Amino acid sequence: MLGPYRLVEQIGAGGMGHVYRARDERLHRDVAIKTLPPAFSRDQERLHRFEREARAAAALNHPNILSIYDVQVEQGSAYIVSELLEGSTLREKLNKESLPVRVALAYARQILSGLVAAHQRHIVHRDLKPENLFILRDGRVKILDFGLAKLTEPEPIADPSEAATMETLETKAGTILGTLAYMSPEQLRNRPVDERSDIFSFGAILYEMLTGKRAFEADTTADLISAVLTQDPLERRQGLTPLPQGLESIVHHCLEKDPGDRFQSASDLLFNLETMAGALATVATTSIVPPPETAQSRNQAYLRWAFFGLALAAAIGGGILLGKKLFSKPLPAYHQLTFRRGRVWAARFTSDGNSVVYTSSWNGNPPEIFTTRAEGTTSRSLGLGRAELLAVSSSGELAVLLNRKSYPGDGELGAGTLARVPLEGGAAREVLEQVQEADWSPDGSSLAVVRYLGGKERIEYPVGKVLFETSGWISSLRVSPAGDRVAFLEHGGQWDDRGWVTVVDLARNTKRLSGEWASEEGLSWSRRGDEVWFTASKAEEAHALYAVSLSGEVRVVERAPTNLMLQDIARNGDVLLTAYKHSTTVMALTPETNGKERDLSWLDDVLVFDLSADGRFFIFQYYGEGSGANYTSYLRKTDGSPAVQLGEGAAIALSPDAKWVLTIMNQPRRTVLLPTGAGEPKELERAGFDDITEDVWLPDGKHVLFTASQPGKVPRSYVQDIDGGAPKPITPVGITALQVSPDGKTFLVVDAQGTRSLMSLPGTESRPVPGLADDDVVIRWGADGRSLYVRRPLELPLKIYRLDLGTGRKELLNEISVSDAAGISGYPTVFLSSDGRSYVYQFQRYLSELYLTKGLGK
């Protein structure tokens, strides 16, 4: 007996212990128990590995990952209790027989599905190989042994010896952890690994499943390592049966030596493999071997061919239309509903599907709600003023947002007052404050809402019952047709629209249905409620329309040579889509331009993030097509010379000497300094911190300031030396720094209630900012250290003021007007030099048309 478990028989053994079939006497079920022998339990390194396996695997709950039930220590032996599996390992299968392509792909898709779940929790397996993949008797695959799993967000190293560089292949334990033939090049070189290391190992496994041969083979350890580091297994297959072209490309992409050249996420890889599997399945149906012929089957065949001949003759006689119906799926039909210049913000069908209600901003005017007949060409205003449509109920009642106020630093995100309005007209009845989005329950009796409270966004359904909360943000909230779930787009960072398609049920069980998308906006349930449709992009392409099942299977619904955004799906399957185009205008004024602004626009989708104190340089990040998963950073002079591409990353802050740009990498999340001239990038170590925001440079150019929280703690601000060393707290808990004075001694800070004040260091006491209104936007500190440059929010023309910190008096410094306001998204963002004589500002233009689409599927 081990505790309540009765050992029945030994069913396996390995370097990490023995595996037994056991009986749980409490729950009366058969389980598997993996033990660590007492001698090994006294070895702290082995015990640490064993416990790490338990923690990593127990954190995961996925049908393709071994389920962990219990972890205990009994009589000096540690053990893990897991589900009992019946079947064999993939290694045993590969030793017995070669796998058909369809079987190999079925296994591969399940392995990837499990890896996607693990990687979403920042867990890397690090020991993926056929021995650690178990095939159940029903064909399901389970990933075993997370004993070498490592969180990609590393914990602080307690023992410095753990970080020692391994100088030879021999370790004190005798071998490198893992199995050489499936280890990634970076793992063999003892370099940091992330999810892409598992992708390399998966590529080696996929190659072996498809070919029956190992990807890397050699007679000695040294030769095997050399093969992994230098050889391309696909090139060694010359003269042998080739792989299908698409599969060969996928395998090759997995086995790239440089992690940056591989698939960047398991979800991307799974998407490509799903697409390839579907294509191969279509081809396979045309080459199935027929059964033995009988007289009856011969007669049936004659009838089928006779019918086919009649159909073909009818197609020829009737023309191309009938041929299309017989042999191809009809193309979707698009009917344009809007024709004016501006942006469509939101659109919904009425319950009968005969009318469409939408919010739009035409020709630079404020948002307004309109209605039109489905397939009509004219629209009429509902006369609600500055109201924005959120949802239409089954009884014809509108949920609208009144008086939306943008969040600081974001012209699009904001909260307002939720109100209810009859579709046929009438006064709005206010319901709830601090609402960002809302959707009706299927019967129209209650509402699901997104609210912004206490610095976090949360979903309430019905109002008052919290189902989900995040320090990021939430968009495209939609209640399922059955009313039992809420689907939404989850975004990890307040400033970024990358994220996941997520659902939460009424019991607060949350599930991410998709991997992370570089950009996503627009979501709706399919009419049957079995899929969630959404529009998103992988960064190197325009937004396309996708569908994901509740089990996480993603498929492409529609692509177009422009960006698509899903608005709604009617009960009859009709779809509302907007087609749109982004563009970014960047303008600058410097003393050299003699009072005239200079157009510095570059590429289409960019965000300016900082201007040097002297007004000579600014940085921006590009996030449009071809920008990559981590975006791309640029430096540009305000004299009009071409922009300089610095490299991968989202540019955030420019150092005072303009020699470094602080950037954010998203896959995996890390903070990196890019040199603007000669030099190598530097990564800032920020392990153990969550929700990192507000990166700014201190005046000495050797330290950066950022706001973050440690697990379970309230956010505060930290200072970090760019040449190394752990971040040090600089503000009290709950106080975060926004700006720093030119002498580096005074900070503009904000507390949890949103109140801004001035704080001098050393010390913790703060004092009010004289003359600063609650909604003033602070641009930067003045060069004299005694003033702030501020602007009013939601104001055009945009007015810049100098605020005297001694008297609280505001002096108008400059005024910026935009001549063509059509399609401008939010309000211009402005950056000012420290002397106030130069500025750079940008605005996004978003022009779109609304379409009713028929024939897109279920």
Image (spheres, rainbow, N blue to C red):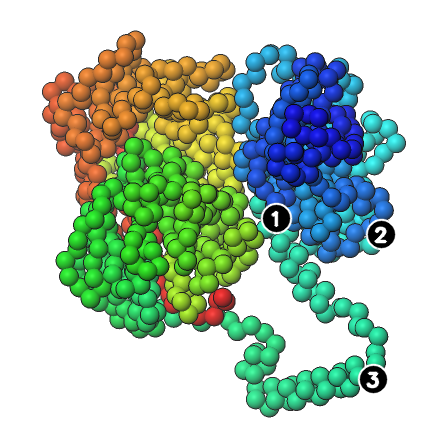
Q: Which residue type does callout 2 highlight?
A: Leu
Q: CA distance from mark 2 to mark 3?
A: 41 Å
Query: Residue 725: image x %, image y %?
Result: 49, 14
Q: CA distance from mark 1 to mark 3?
A: 46 Å
Sequence-wise first label, 1 or 3: 1
Q: Secondary structure at mark 3?
A: helix
Which numbered disc, 2 or 3, marks the residue closer to the eye? 3
In the picture, the quarter occupied by the N terminus is top right
Sequence-wise first label, 2 or 1: 2
Instruction: Report the residue at 68% width, 62% height from top.
Output: 281
Q: Secondary structure at mark 2?
A: loop
Which numbered disc, 1 or 3, marks the residue closer to the eye? 3
Q: Which residue type does callout 3 highlight?
A: Ala
Query: Residue 658: image x %, image y %?
Result: 41, 25
Q: Which residue is mark 1?
A: 270
Q: Which residue type does callout 1 highlight?
A: Leu
Q: Which residue is mark 2?
A: 240
Q: Which residue is mark 3?
A: 295
Instruction: Tell me if 13 is positioned left or right of 343 in this view.
Output: right
